[in-house]
Image: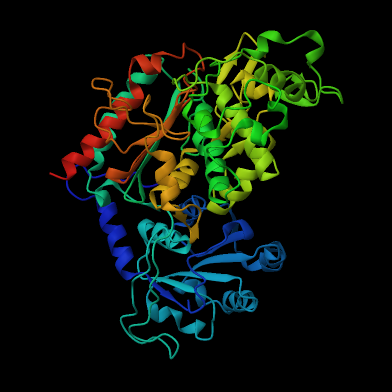
């Protein structure tokens, strides 16, 4: 479901007005234990039960922007079964209204849930309607407005996507007095309209729609998602096109894409930053210091900083798939061929360790200190990370970042976790695996490595990437947790080389006149990365902006058309123009 697409063609949108009213009038009660906003999402299982919420679908969809929440509907005759179903949840959110609270069975149900401190109540109606709940101890979100905006605001308040600031206008009960109302602060992404960030929806939506329509018509990509975060709020999140040209399966904002080289910053560099802060990774230490297998190679004196700047003298790319022999793969899964890299294609056990890693270590070296983009850099950095972390890269980033941040889709090998219809098909592979790649990494080297590599293999939705990089813009903080120091973020994302624009792992704004990279209007502070499959993430601290573009440009047409038509930078500049126009 796409939310927040109500539009006004001039001035402030009616929806934005409703959101502003909800923010002023919604009241948080019974929060003395600071239950809200919810923290430690990785330790919670959350259910959402509707007992009279008019906009239950919108409320539930917004909850699921923050973490997985299971929906239930209350019925008078199904109360016993519902109680049993709710036993395994640590947090139970109930939506109700004044009419529902007049039912003594509903009140009894709420008080039973209240006994073990699992209940969060969202109530729509006049505050006086709370009188039947005089002894309830659970947090209560009271919204006098029964609107879509009020439901979405309440869902965000639960997770700290927005502030609680309303107070009761009059006494309701001894426990609920005039002026009562707990204040909270925003600790996670919010979701709103462009108007709240000083833009108009017309100025941002019309040019993006036009560019994306042109991209699809000219077969630069069959579909995609564009997401914009401004000032800590998602103000634009829209899907375009379909999974394939002519397909009836439309792309959704929740669709999961192969991120390709965005993996470098959203997984590998992320892990390196954590180990750097823990003093388990030294930028000046060498491959020989960390990897015993590198000691006998010409790679032993390459240091971590050279790997992350692509200045290690490594060859750019090795076409590992061209060297496959008959005994290396099978079209059926067996104990000898357990690594699935596509539907109907399996690789023999330990192929990466036995063949790929030794081959990389035995390649020749070019002069160090010269910029040459190389996937081998991140292959080797992954080896170092796993040695220092004591676990695989995919498990490490999931445990350290994705799960506590509330990122639900980000991860490697997504076919193990999601249905195919959530996964955008990346390419009809006619030269290697000879099948449609849907949920299996496109990059051949990453596939042969089992789907987990330092340079490719990560899949995610646009919303998950927005969460991750909002943490960066927050100075390393998100959801009440400090993931990084600001100084660490500054170090890795700033220019670190005299011979290139690169940061440590991150690509950056290009200072060379005329290059206009990543776009004409991006500020010199901009950092991020693009991906070969047609993806991009760019963060611009000057504008407090995150721009996310996801597509599957390889599916059906040559890869370079998206670049030759400048689809990604044109959309990025359209966003800047909307911001600048709003500031005039």
Q: Residue at x 33, y 36 (%)?
A: 526
Residue 277 at x, y percent in the picture: 53, 50
Q: Is residue 429 left or right of residue 234?
A: right
**Residue 92: quarter of image:** bottom right
Residue 498 at x, y percent in the picture: 36, 28
**Residue 137: quarter of image:** bottom right
In the figure, 110 relative to 228: above or below? Answer: below
Whether residue 420 is visible = no
Judging depth in this view, the residue of 313 and 236 nearest the camera is 313
Residue 521 at x, y percent in the picture: 24, 32
In the figure, 345 relative to 455: above or below? Answer: above
Residue at the extreme left of the image, as rendered: 584
Residue 123 at x, y percent in the picture: 45, 70
Judging depth in this view, the residue of 544 and 136 nearest the camera is 544
Residue at the extreme right of the image, as rendered: 335
In the figure, 56 relative to 225: above or below? Answer: below
Q: Is residue 99 left or right of residue 325?
A: left
Q: Residue at x 65, y 19 (%)?
A: 360
Whether residue 103 is visible = yes
């Amino acid at each position: 479901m796409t939310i927040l697409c109500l539009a006004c063609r001039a001035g402030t949108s009616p929806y934005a007005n409703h959101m502003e009213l909800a923010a002023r009038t919604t009241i948080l009660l019974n929060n003395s234990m600071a239950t809200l906003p919810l923290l430690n999402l990785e330790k919670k299982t959350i259910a959402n039960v509707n007992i009279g919420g008019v906009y239950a679908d919108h409320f539930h969809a917004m909850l699921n922007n923050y973490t997985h929440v299971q929906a239930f509907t209350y019925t008078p005759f199904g109360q016993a079964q519902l109680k049993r179903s709710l036993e395994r949840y640590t947090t139970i959110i109930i939506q109700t209204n004044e009419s529902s609270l007049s039912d003594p069975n509903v009140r009894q149900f709420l008080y039973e849930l209240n006994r073990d401190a699992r209940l969060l109540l969202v109530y729509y109606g006049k505050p006086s309607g709370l009188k039947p709940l005089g002894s309830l101890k659970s947090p209560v979100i009271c919204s006098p407005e029964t609107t879509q905006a009020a439901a979405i605001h309440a869902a965000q308040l639960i997770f700290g996507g927005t502030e609680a600031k309303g107070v009761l206008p009059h006494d309701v009960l001894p426990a609920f007095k005039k002026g009562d109302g707990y204040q909270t602060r925003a600790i996670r992404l919010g979701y709103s309209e462009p108007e709240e960030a000083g833009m108009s929806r017309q100025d941002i939506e019309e040019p993006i729609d036009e560019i994306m329509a042109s991209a699809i018509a000219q077969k630069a990509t069959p579909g995609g998602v564009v997401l914009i975060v401004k000032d800590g709020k998602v103000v634009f999140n829209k899907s375009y096109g379909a999974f394939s040209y002519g397909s009836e399966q439309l792309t959704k904002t929740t669709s999961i894409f192969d991120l390709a080289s965005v993996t470098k910053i959203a997984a590998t560099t992320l892990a390196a930053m954590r180990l750097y802060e823990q003093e388990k990774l030294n930028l000046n230490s060498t491959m020989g210091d960390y990897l015993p297998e590198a000691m006998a190679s010409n790679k032993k004196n390459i240091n971590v900083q050279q790997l992350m700047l692509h200045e290690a003298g490594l060859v750019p790319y090795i076409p590992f798939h061209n060297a496959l022999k008959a005994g290396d793969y099978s079209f059926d899964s067996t104990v000898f061929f357990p690594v699935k890299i596509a539907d109907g294609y399996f690789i023999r056990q330990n192929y990466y360790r036995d063949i790929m890693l030794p081959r990389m270590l035995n390649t020749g070296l070019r002069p160090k200190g010269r910029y040459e983009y190389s996937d081998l850099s991140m292959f080797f950095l992954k080896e170092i990370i796993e040695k220092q972390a004591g676990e695989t890269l995919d498990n490490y980033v999931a445990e350290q970042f994705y799960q506590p941040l509330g990122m639900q889709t980000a991860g490697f090998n997504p076919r193990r976790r999601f249905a195919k219809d959530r996964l955008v098909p990346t390419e009809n592979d006619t030269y290697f695996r000879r099948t449609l790649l849907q949920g299996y990494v496109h990059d051949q080297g990453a596939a042969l490595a089992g789907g987990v590599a330092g340079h490719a293999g990560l899949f995610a939705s646009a919303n998950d990437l927005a969460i991750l990089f909002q943490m960066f813009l927050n100075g390393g903080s998100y959801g009440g947790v400090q993931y990084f120091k600001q100084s660490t973020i500054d170090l890795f994302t700033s220019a670190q080389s005299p011979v290139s624009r690169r940061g440590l792992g991150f690509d950056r704004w290009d200072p060379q006149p005329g290059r206009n990279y990543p776009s004409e209007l991006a500020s010199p502070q901009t950092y991020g990365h693009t991906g070969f499959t047609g993806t991009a993430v760019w963060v611009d601290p000057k504008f407090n902006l995150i721009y996310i573009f996801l597509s599957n440009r390889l599916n059906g047409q040559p890869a370079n058309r998206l670049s030759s038509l400048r689809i990604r930078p044109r959309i990025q500049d359209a966003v800047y123009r909307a911001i600048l126009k709003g500031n005039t």
